[in-house]
Image (spheres, rainbow, N blue to C red):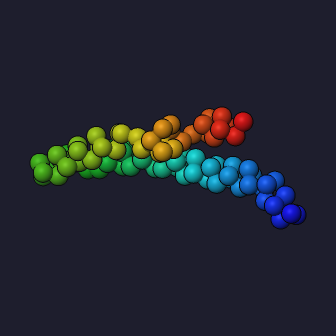
């Protein structure tokens, strides 16, 4: 009985911490994606091979699209969603 009581008190904290970790990783991935796009832009592409320039343009356009993690294809994973679900 005591174990069940302790478990019932700790699981909301565990879920909140796990959710926060996923939100933090989502944010870090978004920041890294922006840095990747800037790195592509700063590449020395003037005078480079046309095939390289086309590939660079393709990569830059793909990097502009942000990655959005969702909760079961229902809603985006964000801190606001976690707070709403927690309440």
Q: Is residue 40 left or right of residue 79?
A: left
**Residue at x 57%, y 40% (from the top left corner):** 78
Q: Residue at x 51, y 44 (%)?
A: 71
How far across and how far down the image is residue 73, in percent?
44, 41
Q: Nearer the viewer, residue 45 or 72?
A: 72
**Nearer to me, 50 or 7:** 7
* Horizontal and vertical percent position of residue 80: 62, 35
In this view of the protein, can residue 2 be seen by the observer?
yes
Q: Residue at 81% x, 61% y: name it.
A: 4
Instruction: Judge whether residue 34 can be spotted in this image.
Output: no
At 86% from the left edge and 63% from the top edge, which residue is drawn? 1
Return the x and y of residue 83 as percentages of the image width and height: 67, 37
Q: Which residue occupies the extreme front position in the image? A: 1
Residue 24, how many percent across, how many down?
A: 59, 49
Side of 27 where 62 appears, left or right: left
Tell which residue pokes out farthest to the right in this image.
2
With 15 as the anchor, is 34 left or right in this view? left
Residue 67's place in the image compared with 13, above or below, is above
If the image is split into quadrants, where does the C terminus sit?
A: top right
Residue pushed farthest left? 50
**Residue situated in front as seen by the camera: 79 or 86:** 86
- Looking at the image, how many numbered discs can be counted on the residues? 0
In this view of the protein, which residue sits in the foreground, 10 or 48?
A: 10
Q: Left or right: 67 with respect to 9? A: left
């Amino acid at each position: 009985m005591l174990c069940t009581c302790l478990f019932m008190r700790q699981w909301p904290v565990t879920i909140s911490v796990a959710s926060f970790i996923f939100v933090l990783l989502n944010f870090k991935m978004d920041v890294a994606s922006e840095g990747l796009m800037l790195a592509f832009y700063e590449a020395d592409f003037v005078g480079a091979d046309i095939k390289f320039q086309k590939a660079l343009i393709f990569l830059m356009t793909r990097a502009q699209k942000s990655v959005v993690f969702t909760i079961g294809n229902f809603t985006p994973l964000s801190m606001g969603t976690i707070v709403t679900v927690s309440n």
